[in-house]
Amino acid sequence: MKKALVFLFVMTTCYTKAQCAMCKAVVESGDQGMAEGVNDGIMYLMIFPYILVAALGYALYRYKKKQTK
């Protein structure tokens, strides 16, 4: 189960392209290279909250596992 969730998370983050409506409107009027740069920047910024939540979840998991022993 855990491997399936990790695989799903990795595959989802690898192939998703994210843009807000304002960024999309600005990028559509520009060139393709700039659009890819904006997408990469957004994905880069989105990774850190997921890492923090995963680290917190792992810490809570270890804490609960330690409490049950």
Image: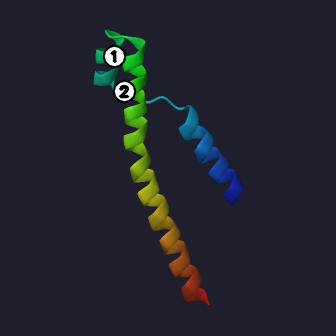
Q: Residue furthest bottom?
A: 69
Q: Are marks 1 and 2 in contact (CB under 8 Å)?
A: yes
Name the residue that disc number 2 marks: 38
Quarter of the image where the C terminus is located: bottom right
Q: Secondary structure at mark 1?
A: helix
Up-down: is 63 above or below 54? below
Residue kind at label 2, given as amino acid type: Val
Q: How is the image coloured?
A: rainbow
- Identify the residue shown where x is 49% and y is 60%: 54
Checking the image for residue 54, the label placed there is none
**Residue 45, quarter of picture:** top left
Q: Position of residue 11 (x, y in %)?
A: 62, 40
Of mark 1 and mark 2, the one earlier in the sequence is 1
- Identify the residue shown where x is 45% and y is 52%: 50
Q: Position of residue 6 (x, y in %)?
A: 63, 52
Up-down: is 3 above or below 22? below
Name the residue that disc number 1 marks: 27
Residue kind at label 1, given as amino acid type: Val
- Identify the residue shown where x is 56% and y is 85%: 66
Q: Which sits in the foreground, 37 or 46?
A: 37
Q: CA distance from mark 1 to mark 2?
A: 8 Å
